[in-house]
Image (cartoon, rainbow, N blue to C red):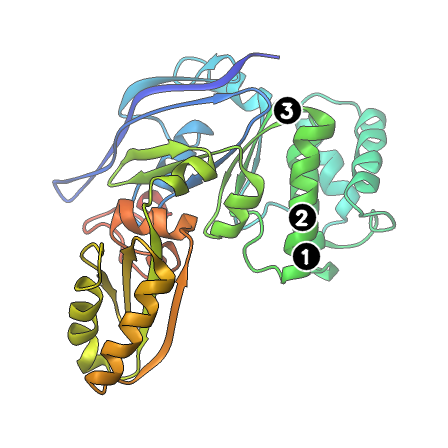
Amino acid sequence: MLSRVIHARGLARTFRKKKQEVHAVVGVDLDVEAGEIVGFLGPNGAGKTTTLRMLTTLLEPTAGTATVAGCDLVTDPVGVRRRIGYVSQSGSTYPDARAGEEVVDHARLYGMSTAEATERGRKLFADFDLDGLWERQPKTLSGGQRRRLDIVVGLIHVPELVFLDEPTTGLDPQARANLWQHIRDLREERGTTVFLTTHYLDEADALCDRILVIDHGAIVAEGTPDALKSQVGGDVLTVTVAEPRQVAAVARLVEQLPGAEAPQVLDDRVVGRVRHGGTALVELVRGLDRESIAVSGVESRRPSLDDVFLQLTGRSLRDAESRPAVPGAPAAEEVTV
């Protein structure tokens, strides 16, 4: 297996619509080593989906170079497709087909015989807790079962690199936790390199060896989850204000705390960083009481990946999904997460 399965430099994509240019990706540099689980995070409009579509040969770059699984992205896209697996956010199985038939048909596209595809498919069904579902229609499966079936389809041709686009979106907590273990097993038991996008920061924290953050079409940070969190100094103080008109007063009180940095206001929440969260929390509560400001919640905690994201992009990832797409974009999926 290659030591580096993705190597991209200056990867860019510009869309044109009605004589207007939209620079969705402006020069992405990234490397992914064999056997890594890498998380790719970014708000709507940041260029995440566009980058993913370029890396999976679904969209041709406007500029830049990249090799994926040892093949040049532009000159040998077929070679890339033969060596990667791709599990889209929306899934790829036909609802009225038979689950086993979908897997076998996909394998046949890669040149596998029916017998080989059936043998490998049934083994993957067992590995992914899908025993007994070979003859079932995807539309009759649970959300977790359908996502595991999507991953089986993406793995049937034995790719060395698999792209997972929002793999657990819409799943309940138990199904998410179950799928997390299957994703870990891809690397631990099969040696598969995993490149995944997610809106769940706890998912990125739990699964990923490294995280890449994209914003405004460029990579703005990368590193292990712990290394990224260590960049956020001090403790995080969050105040949820009962009366929105009092947000400015709360922000002023937070900014006046010893060692505090200028806080950020997110709707009815004020988020600031302080050196000593416990001491600052006591002083803040006294100030709120003194000025008769009603709040619905106050907390102090250690930094999380969401705080990293907030510091890098100026917004919380859980709030980013509502951000409008880039104006003038030709299609939402080309410029959104």
Q: CA distance from mark 1 to mark 2?
A: 6 Å
Q: Is residue 322 left or right of residue 37?
A: left
Where residue 82 appears, as percent x and y from the top left, is 59, 21
Along the polypeptide, which appears first: circle 1 or circle 3?
A: 3
Q: Give whichever of 155, 272 is nearer the camera.
A: 272
Q: CA distance from mark 2 to mark 3?
A: 19 Å
Q: Residue furthest bottom?
A: 292
Where residue 238 appears, as percent x and y from the top left, is 34, 66
Asked where in the image residue 246 lies, by quadrant, the reply is: bottom left
Residue with the mark numbered 3:
159
* Mark number displayed over residue 179: 2
Q: Is residue 176 left or right of residue 268?
A: right
Q: Give whichever of 34, 282 is nearer the camera.
A: 282
Residue with the mark numbered 1:
175
Which residue sits at x=69%, y=46%?
Answer: 148
For badge 3, the amino acid type reads Pro
Up/down of 207 relative to 328, above or below: above
For badge 1, the amino acid type reads Ala
Up/down of 322 relative to 326, above or below: below
